[in-house]
Image (cartoon, helix red, strand yellow):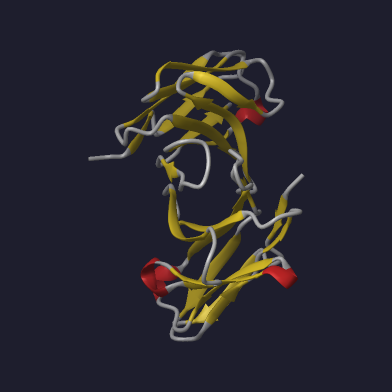
Amino acid sequence: DTAVSQTPKYLVTQMGNDKSIKCEQNLGHDTMYWYKQDSKKFLKIMFSYNNKELIINETVPNRFSPKSPDKAHLNLHINSLELGDSAVYFCASRRGLSANVLTFGAGSRLTVL
Amino acid sequence: AQSVTQPDIHITVSEGASLELRCNYSYGATPYLFWYVQSPGQGLQLLLKYFSGDTLVQGIKGFEAEFKRSQSSFNLRKPSVHWSDAAEYFCAVDRTYGNKLVFGAGTILRVKS
């Protein structure tokens, strides 16, 4: 069973479109994250939710809107896609807020043309 | 703000040779320290972590890392590299009681036969 699953794994779309990436974890964790890995492989945190509440928002453009319908899901919606949004987006989860290991999903590669 | 430096972008070693990947962090107190590995097209897998106690920690796949407080370092080592170890390795830091895993820029390991 996949612990942290993301869909879709690959997404190719045109500039200006709106797209969503979904994330689900079956680990019983209560904190979830979105990380962005750019073309230089640099991983940077975007958002974190704890029990459906937003606790980290790292100066991400407001075209990005995370939504957590329950603590097992954290979806990422992106409006008006730009070329610079092309990246691999990783979802992660952990139990509690600290002193625990993050478990990552396999990533969703977004390509904006 | 905490930061993580991995000074080597690429490292090439011969199969069977020893390996050391460097990681330095900048933070006022002892953070939680991690090494993750990312194989091509894959997500991030935890190799090992340091929270407290013995400064030499053992991880999976024969990897170990040593925390040196005086040098603010957490270098990853393996005595004998296998071709399957070729991947990108990320050092990461999380603040004590914090909630934000910060990654280094990664080191790409190439293994030559």
In the rendered image of this protein, does residue B66 appear above or below residue A103?
below
Say which quadrant the C terminus of chain B sits in: bottom left
Residue at image x 52%, y 36%? Answer: A97
Query: Looking at this view, is A101 or B91 the one in front?
Result: A101
- Residue A17, given in percent of the width and then of the height, sits at 55, 13
Residue at image x 38%, y 34%? Answer: A29
Number of callouts: 0
Residue at image x 44%, y 86%? Answer: B16
In the rendered image of this protein, does residue B19 appear above or below residue A48?
below
Outermost residue toward the left in this view: A1
Residue B62 seen by the camera = yes
- Residue B99, given in percent of the width and then of the height, sits at 58, 38
- Residue A39, given in percent of the width and then of the height, sits at 62, 44
Residue at image x 59%, y 25%? Answer: A55
- Residue B34, given in percent of the width and then of the height, sits at 54, 57
Query: Looking at this view, is B41 or A94 the one in front?
Result: A94
Say which quadrant the N terminus of chain B sits in: top right
Residue B39 seen by the camera = no
